[in-house]
Amino acid sequence: MSDECKICKSKTIRLEKRIRRRAPNRLYRRCTECEFISLEDSFLLTSEEEFDIYERHENSIEDPAYVGFFQSFIENAIVDHMDKEDARCLDFGSGPSPVLAQLLEGQFDWSVDRYDKFYTSEKVYEGNRYDLITSTEVVEHLDDPLHYFRLFKSLLAPDGILSIMTLFHPGNDEDFADWFYPRDPSHISFYTPKTMEVIAEQVGLAILYCDDHRYITLSHD
């Protein structure tokens, strides 16, 4: 694997992290400039292995805790930054149980297209523009984040917003070694608010809101 950062092309340093007891260490690269951390390519899962992990998830709109998880995201990362009664939306990476899409449709009567590479794989977004694009617990799975952020930018209407949910990594190597988030082997890309600033600059987006924990909302620059 190249020691060049996938986001900003700066130098990276190697990190080791043990995911499970008696399992070999996995190797990551941390960028010395934009703080992006990515799993080394030799440790990436196959599509079949990744799908198997997703199939173990048991989430539904009948689970109040899971609904609350998305409700907080809606209140903080979406509604404070949207001023439309009739929005067209894309839930990118909607998963097997598209709870967020159901909430947006039910609460606001917005039209929500769904895309997920495993569960709703038709690229319904092609040729469309959206007032809102959501991507929740998705960007940590992306091996080439810039490609997807450029795609999101191309799909946004001129006054549209992109709302992202992903846990930002703790920022130092000792804490990363103890952090739970990479224990999911399908989590391969990790960001900080600084990483997101660099991504936004690279693709022509502006940051409207960031809670410095797991939510970030962007718009056209």
Image: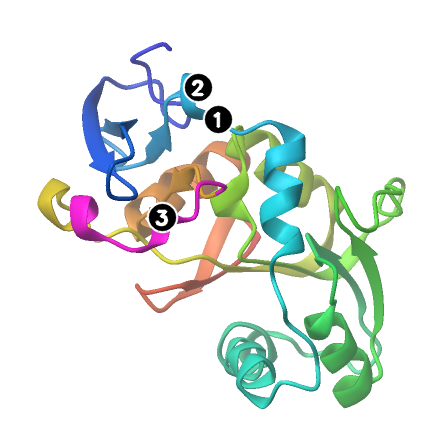
Q: Position of residue 31 (x, y in %)?
A: 25, 28
In the drawing, what numbered circle is on residue 183?
3
Crowd rating for badge 3 (residues with CA inside 10 Å; few <14, some 14–19, many 20+): some
162 and 41: which is toward the camera? 41
- Say what secondary structure mark 3 lies in: helix
Q: Position of residue 27 (x, y in %)?
A: 28, 25
Q: Position of residue 23 (x, y in %)?
A: 29, 34
221 and 49: which is toward the camera? 49
| Magenta part of the chain | 176-186
Q: As drawn, is 208 to the left or to the right of 180?
A: right
Tag 1–tag 2 contact (CB < 8 Å): yes
Name the quarter where the N terminus is drawn: top left
Q: Which residue is mark 1?
A: 44
- Say what secondary structure mark 1 lies in: loop
In front: label 2 or label 3:
3
Q: Which residue is mark 2?
A: 41
C-alpha gap between disc 2 and disc 3 = 17 Å
